[in-house]
């Protein structure tokens, strides 16, 4: 755990140094800063570590939400709507056209690409232009998944269901008290205070609680059974993939 804490501290320092350098050179006024997680930790199996995707199911190399969801933040003076939380559908391939548009590029010059331009969605809080994500089609292990709006279909499973578990945080969920103050006292916090010429950078109250995934909020049934051939979830209402609608008589139409 000490190694992880040390790595996170150094990561904080490196982000702060980048922000200091941009500010010192007068480039922060025209910058878009994005910090994003990887696609899921690996709490089980080969290469397992102390990372956790709780309360989501699965992890890296799986198509469960714990293996494909990411968390990120975007900061920029160029954003029209700031201090908000976003749950707009976005794929990693969308960053290229999004940055290109933010920089003033003409999207037609990029040709036929997979990514969608998310700049207006992120900047102005408009609807996401993306409605579906093909997560994978694996013809070797017969494992594939597609998300269309709030619906998700998974065909097959991996390792006989071993990686379909929901793995709690080792030692229990940590409190978030004091994290905002640590954030404000960081090197990046100091840069932003000077950039905005304020004594204290405003922070949205309770934003950590707002972004937390709550599996019981919509009270879904828990009829999950691993190692079956078809899964169908409403990941908007059931992000923890507890209620496999394919086990009922519903008609799946995508």
Image: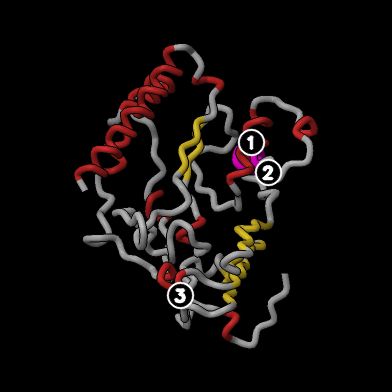
The secondary structure making up most of the magenta span is helix
Q: Residue at x 65, y 58 (%)?
A: 134
Nearer to us: label 1 or label 3: 3
Q: Is residue 43 left or right of residue 249?
A: left
Mark-to-mark CA distance, 2 and 1? 7 Å
Residue receiving disc 1: 96
Image quadrant in which the C terminus is located: bottom right
Q: Are marks 2 and 1 in contact (CB under 8 Å)?
A: yes
Q: How many marks?
A: 3
Q: Earlier in the sequence, mark 1 or mark 3?
A: 1
User: Residue 162 appears at what percent x and percent y?
Assistant: 40, 71
User: Residue 218 appears at what percent x and percent y?
Assistant: 48, 72
Q: Residue at x 47, y 75 (%)?
A: 242
Query: Is-magenta flag for residue 122?
Result: yes
| Nearest the eye: 105 or 75 | 105
Stretch of the chain drawn in magenta: 118-123
Nearer to us: label 3 or label 2: 3
Q: Residue at x 27, y 35 (%)?
A: 9
User: Residue 247 appears at what percent x and percent y?
Assistant: 57, 84
Q: Residues within 10 Å of mark 3 (few under 14, many from 20)?
A: few
Residue receiving disc 2: 115
Mark 2: which secondary structure? Answer: loop
Q: Residue furthest top?
A: 25
User: Residue 239 appears at what percent x and percent y?
Assistant: 50, 66
Q: Quadrant of residue 8?
A: top left
Residue receiving disc 3: 160
Q: Is residue 198 visible?
A: no
Query: Is-magenta flag for residue 180?
Result: no
Q: Is residue 192 visible?
A: yes
Q: Is residue 220 left or right of residue 108?
A: left
């Amino acid at each position: 755990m000490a190694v992880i804490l040390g790595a996170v501290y150094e990561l904080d320092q490196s982000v702060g140094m980048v922000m200091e350098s941009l500010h010192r050179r007068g480039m922060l006024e025209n910058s878009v800063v994005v910090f994003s997680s990887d696609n899921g930790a690996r709490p089980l199996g080969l290469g397992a570590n102390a990372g956790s995707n709780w309360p989501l199911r699965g992890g890296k190399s799986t198509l469960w939400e714990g293996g494909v969801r990411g968390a990120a933040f975007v900061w920029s003076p160029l954003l029209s709507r700031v201090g908000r939380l976003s749950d707009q559908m976005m794929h990693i391939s969308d960053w290229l056209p999004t940055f290109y548009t933010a920089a003033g590029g003409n999207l037609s010059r990029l040709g036929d690409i997979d990514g969608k331009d998310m700049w207006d969605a992120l900047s102005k809080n408009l609807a996401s232009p993306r409605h579906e994500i093909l997560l994978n089609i694996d013809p070797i292990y017969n494992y594939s998944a597609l998300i269309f709006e709030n619906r998700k279909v998974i065909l097959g499973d991996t390792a006989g269901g071993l990686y379909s578990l929901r793995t709690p945080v080792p030692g229990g969920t940590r409190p978030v008290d004091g994290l905002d103050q640590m954030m404000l006292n960081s090197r990046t916090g100091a840069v932003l205070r000077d950039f905005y010429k304020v004594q204290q950078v405003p922070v949205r109250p309770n934003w950590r609680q707002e972004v937390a995934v709550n599996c019981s909020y919509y009270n879904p049934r828990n009829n999950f059974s691993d190692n079956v051939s078809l899964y169908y979830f409403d990941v908007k209402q059931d992000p923890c993939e507890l209620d496999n609608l394919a086990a009922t008589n519903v008609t799946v139409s995508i």
